[in-house]
Image (tube, rainbow, N blue to C red):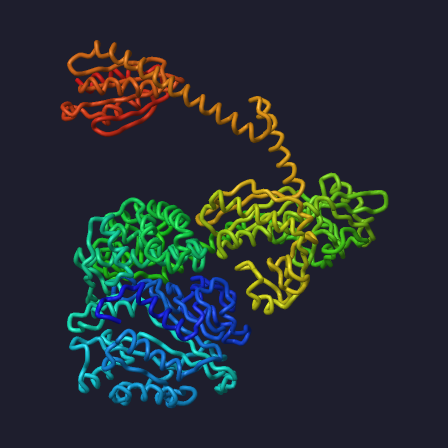
Amino acid sequence: MSAKIPTAAEIRATFLDFFKEKQHTIVPSDNVGYTSRDGARIFTNAGMNQFVPIFLGERSADVDTWPGVLHKGLPTRAADTQKCIRAGGKHNDLEDVGLDTYHHTLFEMLGNWSFGDYFKKEAIAWAWELVIERWKFPPTRVYATIYQPDKSKGDPADRDQEAWEIWAEKFRSIGLDPDIHIVNGNKKDNFWMMGDTGPCGPCTEIHIDLTPGTPELDEARQREGRKLVNGSDASCIEIWNNVFIQYNATPEGTFEPLPAKHVDTGMGFERVCSIIQGTKNFTDFQNAKISNYDTDVFRPIFDELTKMSGKTYASTLPKANEQGHVVPVTEQEKIDVAFRVIADHIRTLSFAIADGIQPGNSDRNYTLRRILRRAVKYGRTLDFKEPFFYKLVDVLAAQMGDVFPELRVKKEQIKSVLKIEEEAFNRTLDQGLGVFESLFREGDIVLPGTPSAASAKRTRIEGAEAFLLYDTFGFPLDLTELLARERGLTVDTAGFEKLMEEQRARARAAMKKNVVSVSEIETKAPTQFIGYDNLEADVKVLEVVEMKDKTAVVLDVSTCYAEMGGQIGDAGQIMFGADTLEISSTSKVGNTWLHFLSDHSAEEIISHKSKIINEPVRLKVDAPRRHAIERHHTVTHILHWALHEVVSKDATQKGSSVTPDKLTFDFNSAALTPQQLADIERLVNERIVANDPVSWSEVPYVEAKANNGIMALFGEKYGDLVRVVQIGGQPHKLDGWSMELCGGTHTRHTGEIGLFRLVGEGAVAAGVRRIEAIAGLEAYNAAKADSDLLKLLAGKVSAQGAADLEKKLDQILTQQKELEKALKAAQQREASGKAKDLLATAANHVLVANLGDVDADYAMAVNDALKSQFTGIIVLAATGGGNVTLMANVGKDHQSKVQAGKIIQTIAPIVGGKGGGKPDFARGGGKDVSKVDAALAEARKLIG
């Protein structure tokens, strides 16, 4: 590179262009979230995640055929820049973000891969070529590490002599001593394993010495730099890791050579930018400013924050206090921490939402909510009281949209989600911050009624105190921890969790006490369910169970589906002899089906109980009702699939209800837009029209769990064998476009559903939405009702069809606006005339009047007309519509005597209401029209 300091965009492009030259296929970044092999929904935290199936031999190397390829090279070579999130679990950087120069929750990982193609010789040679020859890193400051097992610690495999020799040749070629510049590392630093068993191998890393001095170092300084490698000194950092996947770790503890060897590399993009830009393209190590945040990766966001807040970023860093906590002390340190936190977090939230992962209440969705709340809290440091965070999305999309186009495509959706979340949390924050500050001042914990009430200057917030903040004021624990950390305090999280569990136990006990459950019925007679393929059968009555207000029949075999999994139980008939018993619903206790009878049938069977026990009867399911339920249940699966397609893979089911008349479906998400709802309805109906087959298979749970295409409900308990309902694909082959673990009943083809219509969408809890929908005849009836209504409306306005109806309505609305405009103008003229009359009654700069039976709009028009001509004190009342409207104006010269807000606060209660406002203008109202004159008299008295 030239002496010109390259931009971050140029550095990224140089990396990708370099590997284009080396015949690599440039693939787009994978989603920032993915489902792990054990079914967990987690964040992508490394560049290799999307290539794992290739490394495991489950997929051939075919990256040149992948969707969205940016440059087509060889199928066995890939390179990309991968957006990664580390904010939970093993890799959790969240609490450190903002306190130093390098921690992030979102970062880019540059990487190149070989799938059974090139290996160590080419990988190391290309790493040298890019770092030393293209980017011009000073070679005397560069070190390579190779794997040297520490056998005393049981490190696996052998020393990576091959890597050492390749590096040695490179260093010798420019006159440098490989014994100085190649450093050994043990398993901890230089051996990678995917798990306890499976693919693994040694790695080689490139480190750079950033200690002050000249760009090139003499041999003595090179030897000193060597001592810093693989240490904790921030002046010598790793920039690139090359993993050589060449072994298979067996359960027996041996390491066998793999038939195909792979290369997996990762380079921290922000870190490389900070080195190149911080050293002014390697020209100044003496005054180098190595900080990821002092690069143009973050500068555009900082510039926007400065415009919005009026505060500037000064690159200060807080230091650790006596307790070892890094806490900002000066005002500028607090501002700079806030800048870094907000800039990092807007990147994380924006990329996650663009990839379909939204803030929510569980798993990674809750992690995003925590990150957003942390950013909003730090916004208070910059004096942001109103929503501000979402406004940064425009800058980020403009800055990074060329490389990550999803930011521009989803920009408005990202802003909408962030604004809604921010507004909701601001309400909690406003209340909670005030409470926190009043309770905890400079480490003095004075919360009454808690163990700490009598003590002061402690270093910990007790669990009871944190729980009170959460339980009473809705303050999340992680925010309490953040505020505590800023004050050098810790939080008793174990005590908090103990109180939370006690609360959950109380809730469970209350629920158990208050809910009458059929599980209390004592019956152990098992029922064989054959209702998937049969709607009627000859069966035998085993028991008649009498309860307080209902009666149920237990059969040895049943074709009735028992209520479970959100699907309502079947209704039907039991026929014995000439008698027929009506089944109103079916439930399940253990392995026993309870067929609840209608009141009339219950009375009948109780009187003939002895005659029916152990007798054969004919059982019939209400077939039309069952088919209606099947239509609604099958379309629920299609709806779930469509939500994943349109909204997010994280729009997961939180609950559902399926009846003959409708379905409801609860899921994690922000509010859906009208366009999203339209897209969902269209996709569902397209799948119905396709008439795809619906099939089911029983498979071992472990097999279903290993198949990422099969959805299971989180928290549900499953047996060893599970039922997979598949839509599309080849029946029973587990290759459908929708596959879910489900015990419900379904149509045989999607075409049997007929028609699908969304009828409602709204919130049922924070972060949880509910869709209501109808299918089949119910959807047809709704469409018919809409059509009939349109015809009725068209007839009322003499329109010829729906298109003409819209035109007629537009004409009517236009006429209405014109009439309203004319009416308003007439009212203004009338009000001006009334104001002129009232001005004649004013005395001593005071005008108090009852306008009589006029509405609030007319009263306001009179008020405005008076205000433009009269600078004294005005008090008006109006009684239109049986309500009292009160208004007060006080000119600037009279506000020292009396204020408008005070007048209204005093007189509004007289008419049974309330009100208030500012010193110059206030308004209020009430219901008691009879007290208007008394209220105005009190106003005159107050004015004096």
> Foreground: 47 or 322?
47
Please give left or right for residue 847 compared with residue 696 in the image: left
Q: Is residue 63 left or right of residue 124?
A: right
Q: Residue 312: x and y, percent?
A: 19, 54
Indicate whether 495 appears above or below 861.
below
Q: Quadrant of the N terminus?
A: bottom left
Is 204 on the left or on the right of 76, as rendered?
A: left
> Residue 427 at x, y = what percent?
34, 45
Q: Which quarter of the image is occupied by the C terminus? A: top left
* Front-most of residues 373 and 341: 341
* Camera sees residue 763: yes
Nearer-the-camera pick, 313 or 529: 313
Name of the residue lying farthest toward the right: 577
Location of residue 790 (image quadrant): top right
Query: How many numbered circles are shown?
Result: 0
- Whether residue 479 appears in this view of the structure is no
| Relative vertical location of residue 260 with respect to residue 620 in this rendering, above or below | below
